[in-house]
Amino acid sequence: MHLEEPIDIFLSHDASLGTCNNLFATKKHFKDEIQQGTLGSKPAAQLLEKLKPSYWFSAHLHCKFTALVEHEEGGRVTKFLALDKCLPGRKFLQIVDIESDPGPYEVQYDEEWLAITRKLNCVFPLTF
């Protein structure tokens, strides 16, 4: 939420509220959550509204689906893609062509978030 510069691509585990509304066709057991507007992450929805990335990718719901999120300001649109679980015969991989200007490109990490993950590393170890 502290980022000020535009973001082109955002990766998250969970989808945001509002991006999962067309899931009923493939995941009927989500019917109540879809009707109540509770399927997806509220914090992710807040990030989506603030950052308005061009692309958002997630996979928590273990099924492939897409959504277009139209933002009020400036006609920006976020193209959302969720992918399936990594199992044989499932749609867990997709190649996406993203048009962009020629480089150079820069990958940036949020220093505050890195500090939080370092501090909590002892609580959430990568090995058991």
Image (cartoon, rainbow, N blue to C red):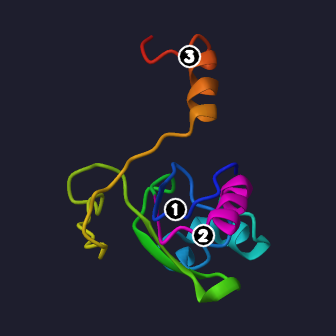
- Where does residue 113 sit, x and y in percent of width and height? 61, 34
Tell me which label, 1 or 3, sits earlier in the chain: 1
Q: Which one is in front, 91 or 13? A: 13
Give me the disc on residue 7. Answer: 1
**Picture residue at 64% right of the left edge, 65% below the top:** 48
Query: Which residue is more in the foreground, 27 or 119?
Result: 119
Cα–Cα span, label 1 and label 3: 27 Å
- SS for dot 2: loop
> 37 or 125: nearer the eye?
125
Q: Look at the image and give the residue range highlighted in magenta.
A: 41-57
Q: Based on the displayed image, in which of its 4 quarters is residue 59 positioned?
A: bottom left
Residue 52 numbered mark, or none: 2
* Mark 1 burial class by Cα count in 10 Å: few <14, some 14-19, many 20+: few
Residue 72: which quarter of the image?
A: bottom right
Nearer the N terminus, badge 3 or badge 2? Answer: 2
Residue at image location 44% in from the left, 18% down from the top: 126
Residue 97 placement, left or right of 16: left
> Looking at the image, which is closer to me, 105 or 41?
105
- Per the image, the residue denoted by label 3 is 121
Q: Residue at x 51, y 78 (%)?
A: 67
Dots 1, 2 in contact, CB < 8 A? yes
Which callout, 1 or 3, points to the residue nearer the camera? 1
Q: Label 3 is placed on what type of residue?
A: Asn
Q: Which secondary structure, mark 3?
A: loop
- Neighbourhood count class around disc 2 (C-alpha, 10 Å): few under 14, some 14–19, many 20 upward: many
Q: Position of residue 118 (x, y in %)?
A: 56, 19
Residue 28 counted in the magenta span: no
The residue depicted at 63 percent of the width and 16 percent of the height is 119
The count of marks equals 3
Query: Do the numbered discs 1 and 3 sit on residues whose CB atoms are within 8 Å?
Result: no
